[in-house]
Amino acid sequence: MTSTRTPLEVVDAAIDTLLAEHDPRSMSAAEFRGARYDAGLAWLQFPVGFGGLGLKPELNRHVETRLRSAGAPAPDPTAFF
């Protein structure tokens, strides 16, 4: 039996992995941005390997909420990944 995950489950798994491997409270904002990009959580609608997961951008708010609650800094609109 093949198990398929919903887009929300894919995003939550990526967030869980990111936070397990990179504590945003002990890293610089730039380092965390880089780890977030590598995890595909920078811009969800972008393709895998380009800061995204190829998913609908509506899930970006969920990513931001989860990361803020884990202590990640708010995105800097003037910074590039």
Image: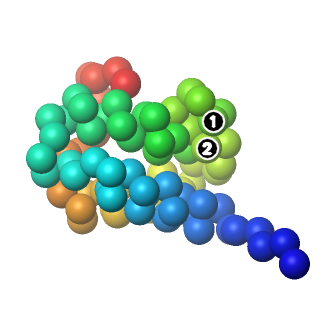
Task: Identify which residue, 26 or 74, lies in the foreground.
Answer: 26
Answer with left or right where residue 66 lies relative to residue 9: left
- What residue lies at 19% left-to-right and 35% top-to-bottom? 29
Residue 19 in percent (x, y) is at 32, 56
Residue 9: tell me if it is visible. yes
Residue 70 in percent (x, y) is at 24, 62
- What residue lies at 16% left-to-right and 40% top-to-bottom? 27
Residue 48 in percent (x, y) is at 63, 35
- What residue lies at 57% left-to-right and 27% top-to-bottom? 50
Q: Which residue is mark 1?
A: 48
Residue 37 in percent (x, y) is at 43, 34
74 over 58 or under it: above or below:
above
Secondary-structure class at tag 2: loop
Answer with left or right where residue 74 lies relative to residue 13: left
Task: Identify which residue, 56 or 16, lies in the foreground.
Answer: 16
Q: Amino acid at mark 1?
A: Val
- N-term-proximal mark, 1 vs 2: 1
Image marks 1 and 2: residues in contact by CB distance under 8 Å: yes
Q: Which residue is mark 2?
A: 53
17 over 31 or under it: above or below:
below
Quadrant into which the C terminus falls = top left
35 over 50 or under it: above or below:
below
Count how many numbered circles sit on residues in the image: 2
Task: Identify which residue, 64 or 52, lies in the foreground.
Answer: 52
Looking at the image, the residue that sits furthest to the bottom is 1
Q: CA distance from mark 1 to mark 2?
A: 5 Å
Residue 45: tell me if it is visible. no
Q: Amino acid at mark 2?
A: Leu
